[in-house]
Image (spheres, rainbow, N blue to C red):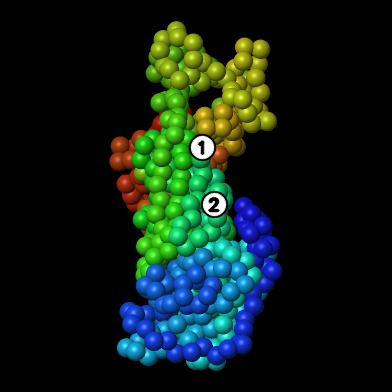
Amino acid sequence: MKRIFYAFCALALAFVMTSCKEPNKPIDLDAEDGVYVYGEATGFDKVDALLLMANGINEAKDQTARDGMFEKYIVLQGGKEFSLLWLNAGEQIYYGANLSEFTLTAEEATGIYADNPVGTIFKGKLETGDAAPKMKMATTGLYHIVLDLNKNNDLSEAQILVAPVQWGVRGGMNNWGFTALEATPASNNGITYVLSGQELGNNGDFKFSYNGAWKITLDDKGEVKANTNLGTDCKPGGSNIVVTEGAGKYKVTLTFKLAGGAIENSFSYKTELQEAASYPENVYMTGTDFGGWSWGSDGIVTLQHISAGGDPKDGCFVTTRYFKADNGFKFSTINVADDWSKAFGGMTTNSENITFDGDGNAHVPSDGLWTITLDYTKDEMTLTEGMIYGMGPAFNDDWTMAKYAGEINADGTATIVALSDGALRVYAPCAFDWWQHEFQPDAEGNLVYREGGELEAFNVTAGQKITFNFNAGTATVE
């Protein structure tokens, strides 16, 4: 997903140059105190309010402001020089650095560099004063500049970092991967980034990120990181952007226009519903063991909606049940007695483990607990072998996926034992993320599924055994 960054980097790799041909000179100006990007590369012939850098945010410290850290997104003209200029009560200090390439491969983007841009960025030790080296990028483009004065002495050195920027989206539409946006030519007067025909579910959520990354690490301990993403209101590290017009195809537009101060001043976005989706409201299942092939009967299974943010995800459904291999089943988008007009056994793309008999009825490969996911957005049916896993407070407050497995019993029920006191979080793997097929008991002993926001906490104590009977819809605690 991040490899799309390489194409952009190939241009920037032409490399970054520094120059000391002429010393930086004092400037006669009247400007607000702060740090500015200054020089011919900006396209401005003087210090301008639009060039004022933002106060930096440390992503590694809960998105809190960091003293002595400054950031700016700006189009720099290739082959032309720039510096950073600090103004304070009439005092002027130039900042510069001999920038060098810092490159991560996909294999190296782990540990403290997890979720960093794959490819090349440029960084160097901060130098100050009139002799500070001027900087130069090889190609014209949008860049993210980060200055850290290391006021807390928690970096190896004060530094300047410059990263080439290619904006894209990460969210439910690409399983939080990365999809690049189409961009107009780079200019501080405005760049428009567009993605058309993007399918999003009901209350589908996403963020803008550049180069497929979430952050850039500045230190060797992973305690100082700059954001490489924009959330709600274009705030770096902000909450997910959520579409509110329902499922369908959207046009997503991100706009950059140079502005001074806070990062969000330079960006805006909009989402436009181009074509509403027409997914079924519900999906039902019948079969030998599920209502005796009789629509409208008590045994019919209503599939759960896959959760997406605070609401169900349109077009995606899931169920976990104990199946017998010899007993077939079918689905329908209506549950009306004797009405088979909407019945179907599979989708265009089916799990290779699903088989079909002469009547088109679906069969699992063996007796056991199975999870079936129907995804109308892909016209795909996925079969997942049944297992349940715990995580979170009742499991040592550990959020590692697939670590605390339960036990599948001979009667088709599933049992898990709490390891510590706290809220119970249990799920069965499906075609989506763990929390999108989460369930728990309620006070009456019913099995309840998450279909939207988080379920109300159900607290257990260490050593308690919880048994789920998916076919009966019950959950007991012992």
Q: Which residue is mark 1?
A: 197
Residue under the image location 55 percent in, 18 percent down: 344
Marks counted in the figure total: 2
Assess disc 2: are there few (<14), some (14-19) or many (≥20) residues with their C-alpha within 10 Å of its C-alpha. Answer: some
> In which image quadrant can residue 152 be found?
bottom left
Q: Where is residue 250 shown, x and y percent of the image?
A: 46, 38
Which residue is nearer to you in this view: 56 or 395? 56
Which residue is nearer to you in this view: 16 or 38? 38
Q: Where is residue 188 shown, x and y percent of the image?
A: 47, 63
Give the label on residue 346, or none: none
Q: Which residue is mark 2?
A: 183
Compare marks 2 and 1 and give the one earlier in the sequence.
2
Residue 235 horizontal side relative to residue 11, left or right: left
Q: Where is residue 89 shown, x and y percent of the image?
A: 32, 88
Q: Is residue 279 above or below residue 216?
A: above
- The amino acid on which the numbered mark 1 sits, given as a three-letter code, is Gly
User: Which callout, 2 or 1, points to the residue nearer the camera?
Assistant: 2
